Image: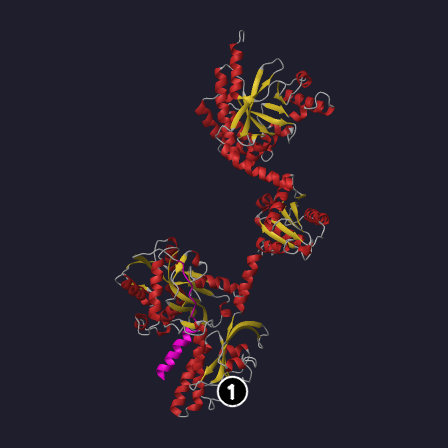
Amino acid sequence: MKTHFRSIRARACLCFCLGSACLSPPASGATTLTVGISDMGSLLSAAPNGQPDGVLGNLLVEIARQEHWTLKTELCAWQDCLRKLRDGDIDLLPAVSLTPDRTAFLDYHQTPALQTWTQVYIRPGEGIRTIEDLNGRRLVTLAGSIEYSYLETLLPSLGVRTRLMPAETLTEGFQQVQAGQADAVASDFFFGNATAPQYGLAATPIIFLPSGLYYATPKGRNAAVLRAIDRHLGVWKADSDSVYYRILTRWDSPRMRPADTDGAPGYGPAVLAAAALVALIALACAGCTRYRARRQARRLRTAEHRLAAVLDQIDDLVCIEDGDRRCRYANRPFREFFDLPAAAPPETPDPDADLDPPHAGGITAADLPALERGERIVAQEQRPSPRTGRTHTFQSVKLPLRDPDGEAGVFCTILTDITARMQAEELARHNAFHDPLTGLPNRILLLDRLEQTLPGARPEAGCSAVLILDLDGFKKLNDSRSHAIGDLVLREVARRLREHTLDRDMVSRVSGDEFMVLLTQLGADPGTGAQRALKIAERLRLVLASTPLEPGEQACVFTASIGLTLLHAGGATAGDAIREADLAMQRARQLGGNRTVFYDHTLQTEFEQRLWMEKDLTLALNTSQLAMHIQPQYARDGRVTGAELLARWTHPGKGPVSPALFVPLAEETSLINHLTYWSLDVACQALLDLQGLDETYPVSVNISPKVLMDPGFGEAVRGLLKRTGAPGNRLIFEITEGVWIQDVEATARRMRELNRLGIRFSIDDFGTGYSNLSSLMRLPIFELKIDKSLIRNLPDDPDSIAIARLILAMAGQLDFWVVAEGVEDEPQADFLARHGCGAMQGYLFARPMPIGDWLNTARRRRERPGS
């Protein structure tokens, strides 16, 4: 009998910690293995000779002996061991639990070496018996372990505010609890039970996280090692006299013995072990009636008391009922949940007396036929607690318990409370498909809804539309007013979009300051649907811009660029619809923002053109496709006063590409840096070539504002002039008026830095941008270039006349040199000459030409007699 109940106690421990194995992917074989060893007491340690010790160490040594492996050990803290395994610094690590995130970088064998669980240990008298008792307490667990990750997610989901304290080793955790630096420690059951008495700590009823222990290797390595481990474990576990059980006996840990895994398909070992345990309890209870002898009854009651004490400490609800569904046994969690009277003491004279009222358990009349046929019933149930009124979700197992004659006299119900797990899973599902800041659906959920809304999926739904909304200037607001203000703005935008759309529509935050709205049921006619969608988009735009948000002292006014595309029968796929709406939104931003743009096919054409231009322009750099042309500038008397260098691109397949297309594209990408430095190289060489022909007029080069304000630009120009020997005083940088809009002082400092190298500055396209006299007078300007749009209507248009005369008068007053661009006929040239324009550039005098052609012209001019 003593041996009988010892076996029962072993099964009681194992039935609640058996995990499931998973298939492990292959890894490369090895004959010499570096094994990470983290001190886990009798579970795993290092022997004096340096070899792995403890249960898992001895098993590995025996496998290595039979496989002729050489083992090298490396001692390390658990988190360091795991990191070294992930980085491939060690080949094998024992005692690793299997988790989904670890399978991304680790491989496992299939059969777990041991089954374990986690238990909480405290100083006696701390009063911690449930998870809720950990509220406000300090709980230590192993850094980097699955226990730490599990508790980090579980406790907040239950509303339990526990301070988690990571420890490098579990021994350190037990020491902290003993010293009062922590209130409790969560530890592997085997290590905890062996270690707790050394520090005067006691185990609590809090048990969780059943899991298997495996040997793990780095991802994609040592597949042969894992297969060998599986092969040996499979053979050993099937033989009760094998070395596997001799090692368990050597370490005096019968609780480590794995439960019998034979059973009906579809039911895990935990269910079968639990069934065997409760069957023995039932037989013990029934034995009270079969054996009236006083001594035997006393021994049975003692065993029953011990077994009941074990079952009272577990979290599962256990109840045994007879054929009339009268409760014959219920453990403490079951009684507390259903608010039942306390169990009768073991000395109860009549063992056949009911412990509780009838029908207190989980067996229903509908369950009885299947149970009487010997079947097991596994289901998920919801049960309300009479004590708290809250409904809990349980995983239930119902099974018959047979007496020695094979009769199913009683039936067992095991209820595992999975409410917290279900809530955590529901929260995880919600977070996977919703934006945490605004609570709106995220891109994944919107795409799923969009796929269901496509006309091909639901032809009867008619037209729908996709709207992409991007906040104008949000990054500037976020950077200048703090991220907290930015988050407040995003939440307010989400609120307004929800309030001004219908319940059948979906508002989503897809990234940063970008929102997406799916509008549905806009009508069967595409024209009507487009009008309705545009009307809604405009309403949303006005709603955002109309009312400022006032966080703190300064109000925030936010506008949006909106792109819109229509879905209708025969229309685009989900990906096409989002791409079209995004192209329309980008066009709205290019047009200045705070507007709605409806997608049309010209946007797609422009987008495709931009794609090939960006790719091919990258390939064209440093090839003959790119060439620099020169256009001279003339005084009215025919003297050449300067020249401008102009980049030209001849595509091998598409011919000449307009600078109006590829220069702005280069401005938006890093290509402008390559283009600018290439232009400067060509300009320096052109200056030297012209100097050799006694042509000493300046050469102008267009400089991007982005490149001009680059911190290293000044030094780069200095190095270029020194390397080439080109005269900096004959180099003019043409910049646009918008270059100083952001920071006039910073622009002036950069220009003065380049002035010291002799370089002068010209304001290109003057009269069309943002210039004001105040900014102009603060900059070291040498030259103004009147934009050709102001020259085109001279000398007939009164407005053009007035503007040109005003610019020329102002330039004369401020002592600026003036060049007029785009001069194409004599009347224009005569007007400009009469009003003091210094130089003119345009087709009237010369078209842009390759630099070599211009140099040849200069040579011929020099060779003419009298030149």
Residue 34 % position (x, y): 31, 57
Residue located at (60% from left, 27% from top): 764
- Is residue 90 magenta-colored? no
Residue 429 % position (x, y): 55, 61
Residue located at (54% from left, 20% from top): 698
Quadrant occupied by the N terminus: bottom left
Residue 455 % position (x, y): 65, 53
Q: Is residue 305 visible?
A: yes
- Is residue 21 magenta-colored? yes
Say which element carries label 1: loop
Q: Give 87 or 780, whichever is nearer the viewer.
A: 87
Q: Decide: is 569 above or below 109.
A: above
Q: Decide: is 140 above or below 710.
A: below
Q: How many residues crowd around disc 1 within 10 Å: few (fewer than 14), some, or many (20 or more)?
A: some
Q: Give 485 or 96, whichever is nearer the viewer.
A: 96
Residue located at (73% from left, 49% from top): 528
What residue did someone put label 1 on? 354
Q: Is residue 179 visible?
A: no
Q: Decide: is 156 above or below 518.
A: below
Residue 261 % position (x, y): 41, 72
Quadrant occupied by the C terminus: top right
Magenta region: which residues?
1-25
Horizontal side of residue 290 vs 470, given as left or right: left
Task: Tell me the kind of residue under disc 1.
Answer: Asp
Q: Residue furthest bottom?
A: 293
